[in-house]
Image: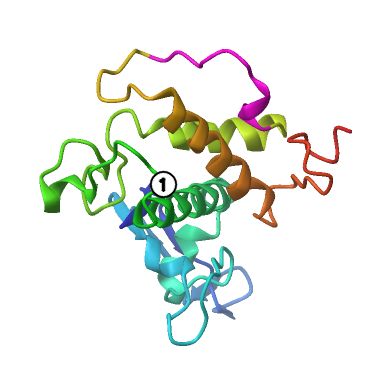
Amino acid sequence: MSEHIDTTTSEVHHVTRYAVDQDHYINEGCIWQKGVPFDIPYGVITPKAEECENLLVLVCVSGSAVSFCTIRLEPTWMHLGEVSGIAAAMTEAAKRFIRGELHGIEDLYKVIGRKERSLWADQRGHLSPGFDRLEGYVFYTTLYGKSLELISAPIKFNNNPSFRSDDLDKIFYQIAWKAVVEHSLSGVTDKNGNGIGDHLD
């Protein structure tokens, strides 16, 4: 599953600088190479299953020194943080599906089971139409520090016919809030359980 697409130039800063003469020097060990679009796979933020479970690691990613040069930039760090929150929400949605709590969802992967109402459209992690709003809910709850459950009226998007259930949508509100308050980097906590971030109370 891909979690980020990037095109950043690969820049490995020089390791050593040699003086050639009084006015000139040579940098050694640097790489400045224009990049091509590439994926950062989901696996770089997940430890090996046999070593640790239920953990997403955003900074100490599994990558080479060269690949880390493109990951280490602030926009990429921010996106990895956002993606990890969405990944936590998607994982919770999958768990609820397996427990039979997502009524109306027929399968996990549309590409595998060929069921129209599946959580994921493909094996790369793209959510099916209508279910992609879960990403938006995670973003909203992180940005505003409030659970969508506090909004009484149904949230209208584009009236996607593949997503008809208000009950399912409310479950997604819960999933998004849970993912955000349990994410240590979101800055949102809800110790009293009122659906409002503690920093806003």
Q: Which quadrant would the N terminus be assigned to in this image?
A: bottom left
In the image, the segment drawn in magenta is 147-157
Classify 122 as above or below 150.
below
**Does residue 150 belong to the magenta stretch?**
yes
Q: Which residue: 30% across, 54% down?
A: 38
Classify 23 as above or below 150.
below
* Quadrant of the image occupied by residue 121: top left
Q: Would residue 122 be found to the left or right of residue 88 on screen? A: left
Relative to the observer, which residue lies in front, 163 or 9? 163
Q: Which residue: 46% across, 37% down?
A: 135
Q: Which residue: 42% across, 57% down?
A: 95
Classify 31 as above or below 51.
above
The residue pinned by badge 1 equals: 101
**Residue placed farthest to the right in the image?**
201
Q: Which quadrant would the C terminus be assigned to in this image?
A: top right
Q: Amino acid at mark 1?
A: Glu
Q: Position of residue 59 (x, y in %)?
A: 59, 66
Question: The residue tagged with tag 1: helix, strand or loop?
Answer: loop
**Does residue 196 belong to the magenta stretch?**
no
